[in-house]
Image: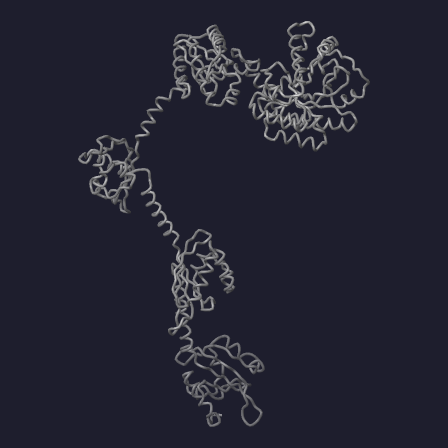
Amino acid sequence: MTDRQPYAWLDGLQEAVWLVDEGSLIILHANDAAQRLAGLPLSTMVGAPVFSLAATPQDQAYWSEPADVVAAGIHSHTSLLRADGVLVPVDRRVTRVPHGAEADTVFMLTMLDRSVQDATERELETLLSELRATLDSAADGMLVCSLDGRVRAFNQRLAQLWSIPRNRLLERDDAAVYEHMASQVVDARHYAERLAAIAREPMAESTDIVELLGGLVLEMRTVPQFNQGRPVGRVYSYRDITRQTEIQASLRLAARVFESSLDAIFIADSQHRVLRMNPGCERLVGPSAKAFEGSMAASLFGGGSDATFMEQVLQGWADEGFWEGELWLPRDNGAYCAVQLSWVALRDDEGRLVQSIGFMRDLTLQHAAQKRIEELAYSDVLTGLPNRLLLSQRVDTAIQGARQTDTGFAILFLDLDRFKIINDSLGHPFGDRVLQLVAERLQTCLRQTDMLCRLGGDEFVIYLHGGDAVVAESVARRILDDMLKPFTLDSMGFSIQCSIGMALYPQDGATLDDLIKQADTAMYRVKERGRGSYGFYQPQMNANLLSRMQMEHAMRQALGLHRMAVHYQPQVNMATGRITGAEALIRWTDPEFGAVSPAHFIPLAEESGYIVTLGAWVMEQSVREAAVWMHSGTPIMISVNVSALEFRQPDFVERITRLLAVHQLPPTLLELELTETILLQDAQEMEQRVRVLADLGIGLAIDDFGTGYSSLAYLKKLPIHKLKIDQSFVRGLPDDDGDRAIVSAIISIGRAMHIEVVAEGVETETQQAVLQTMHCDHYQGFLCAPGLPAEQFRALLSKPLPLKAQGKRSPLKT
C-alpha cells in the first residue's frame, strides 16, 4: 500500500486528494497537493485515520455517519487545520471510486484551497459594505438604474425623502417603486414627461425641481453612468431644498415688501449710516432723499449732531432690540411732518450689530383724524347733539353731586312712532334730515341745564337736571305737544308722534345704564298701549316683559303642539240671508295662558316676525277647508287676513298659487283681506303685487276700512272689490250719529265705485236692519254666528235659512 506507483497519476492533479479505506476510514494515500495543503509528509498521513483531517465538528459528525451515508458523497465548503496551526478554507468533495483489480472501492476525499478566493470575496464584501455605507451616509437620496430602468442600487435617504414603504423595497419590485414615486409628485404629468425626456438622452445631464405632495421640494440631478466609455446606466440624486426654497421665497417677498411698502423704510450699516431707502421713504423725505445716503440716519430728523437722540436709540436696542417713538421729519419746503419711527437692530450670532432697519409712517392724516375724533368723541355725527359718552360723564357728575346734596334727576327715553315708514317711503337721506329737525325742536323744549342725547336711529335720551316726577311729566307733555306741530321739509308738511318713557334717580336705578333700561321699558309699555304718550317706569313692567317673553315662546311652540286652530265666521248676504263667504280666524288655547286673545298674540307675532309663519299656516288650513266645502257641493268664498310683513314676502304670490293648485281651489273662491297700511307702504311695489293677484282671479278686500290713513286714491287705482266696515263703527248703530254717518259714507263710497261692502261685528237685528236700509251688501257677526270650528261651520251650512241671531258678544278677530 506504500508503493506510490499505482497512485502516481494523482500527483498531477492540482487538487489535494486522499484515498480512504471504507471500512476503517484509514488514509491509504495522499498526493503531492494534499501534502502541500496539509503541510504534512505522506508518511505521516498514510495509516492515520481520516478524522485527523476533520477540523470542524460538522466534519467529525460526517465521518461518524454509516458507510452508506458517507458513500453517498458530499460537496461543501469547510476548513482544514494545517500542520502550522492555520485553518485553511477549502472546497471539499467526497466520492466513492473503484480500487484495485477486484470490485473494491475506496472513498476519495478531494480539497481545493479557497484562501485566495475567500480573501477576494471578503475584500469585495468589504468594498460593497463601504460603498453601501457611503451611499447611506449621503445627505442626498441616491438611485442607480440601468439603461432599461432596472434599479441597481439606492440608499435609505431616497426611501426617507420619497416615503417609500420598507416592504416595497424588500419586494425588489422596480415598477412598484417607480409607481410610488410618481404618486408622491404634485405635478405627476410634468414629472413623467421629464423622466421620458431624460431616458431618451442617455449621455445628457439634467437638473430639475420636483415638488412632493408632503410639501418637500427636491432638486433632482441626473448623470450618466459609464463603463469603458459607454453609458450603462444613470444615477439620480435627490436633494431636499425645501428650506432653501422657503428662504429664497422669503427673500424675494422681503424685497417686494421693501420696494412696495407704503411705510417709509431705510437701512443703515453698523455705523448708523444710511445705506438704502425704499421708494416710500424717498417720497416721504422728498427730493433731497438721495443726499442722505451715506449720512448718519439721525440726520434725517434734523438730529445729526444730537447725541442724546442716538443714546436713546442705542439704549432701546440694548433693552428690547428696537426703539420706537414719534419724531418730526423736516421737509424740503421747510415744514415738518410727524412720523412714527420703529428702528430695529439686526445682530449676528455673536451679538454684534450688523445693520439696522428703520420703519417710518406718516402721521399727518392720523393726527388730523385724531383731532376730528376728539371733536366727534362727545357728539352725534348726524345731529350734533351730545352722544352717550358725554351724557355718561354728565350723569356720573350728577350722581356724585346727588349723593352729597340728596337731590335726584330724571331720564327720559324718547322714540319716534312709525319712523320706519318715513325711511321706507321717502328714503334714509330724507329721514336723516327729519331727525335733524326733530333734534332742533326737542332742544327748544329743554333748559340749558338739561341735556338731549341721540342714542342712534330714532331714539333720544334726555337728562333733566334736578328733575322730579312733576318736572319730568311737564317736559314730556311739552315735547308731545310741540312734536305734533307740523314739520315742513322740501315743501312737504308732516307731523311726528313720539312715545316717552321716564325713570327717576335714585328710586329707579343707580347708574345711567339702569335708568336708560328702565326708561326704555316704560317707553315700550307706552307703545303697547297705543303710542303717542308718556309713562313712568314701574317695577311691574319688568315682570310684564318676562310674561311677554314667555307668551312669545309658548306661541312659537303652539303650532307644533297642535294648540292653534282656525275658526270660520260666516259672511251673510244682506238681501238673501244666505251665507256667501267665511272669514278665517286664528284661535290659540294654551294650557298655561288659557284661551289667548288674538289682540294679545297677533301684535306679538307681528313684532317678532313670527306672523309670517302663522299667516302661512292659516292660509294653508283655510284653502284646504274651502276646497272641502267646494267638493261637498257648497262652494263659498274663504276670506283670509294677510299681515303687511307676510304680504311683502318675495314668494307670497308663488306660494298662494301653489296652494290653490295643490288643493284644486278656484282662485275666485279665495279672498285676501289687506289693511290700508299695506297699500300705502312701498306703494308702487304693492300695486304691482295686488294687480298680479287680481289677474289670477283672487278677491281683494280692505279690512277695517276707515280706521287707518284712508285715501280714496288707491281705491281708484287698485282692483279692490270689497270694503269691510270696522266693528267699532257698527257697534254705535243706530243711536250714535257719528258712527251712523261714517257707515253711511263708507257704503256710499262702495256703491259709487262698484265695490261691495261688508259690515263687521253685527250683533243685533236692529243693526242689521239699519245696515240694510243703507244698502250694505253683506254682514258678519254674532247675529249669524261667532267664529266656528270647521266641523260646526259645515253643520251651519246645512241648516235651513234664514238664520236667526245669536245674542252673544263677538270676540276680537284677527
Name the quadrant of the C terminus: top right
Furthest residue in direction right, as rendered = 800
Residue 585 location in percent, x, y?
Answer: 68, 21
The front one of 490 and 502 is 490
Q: Toward the viewer: 566 or 490?
A: 490
Look at the picture and state if 21 lies above or below 264: below
Residue located farthest toward the front when viewing the structure as drawn: 752
Q: Is residue 36 above or below residue 328?
A: below
Q: Where residue 613 sits: x, y (%)?
A: 63, 27
Which residue is rendered at x = 52% and y = 82% of the image? Answer: 94
Q: Nearer the viewer, residue 287 or 134?
A: 287
Relative to residue 411, is residue 62 depicted above or below? below
Tell me where residue 752 appears, x and y as whole percent: 66, 15
Name which quarter of the figure residue 526 lies in: top right
Q: Nearer the viewer, residue 773 or 141?
A: 773
| Residue appearing at x 46%, y 52% in the figure | 214
Residue 658 horizontal side relative to residue 530, left or right? right
Does residue 321 appear in this view?
no
Name the spot of residue 64 as percent of width and height, x first.
54, 79
Task: Indicate how the structure is coloured in the image.
Answer: one colour
Q: Is residue 650 visible?
A: yes
**Residue 329 relative to residue 764: left or right:** left
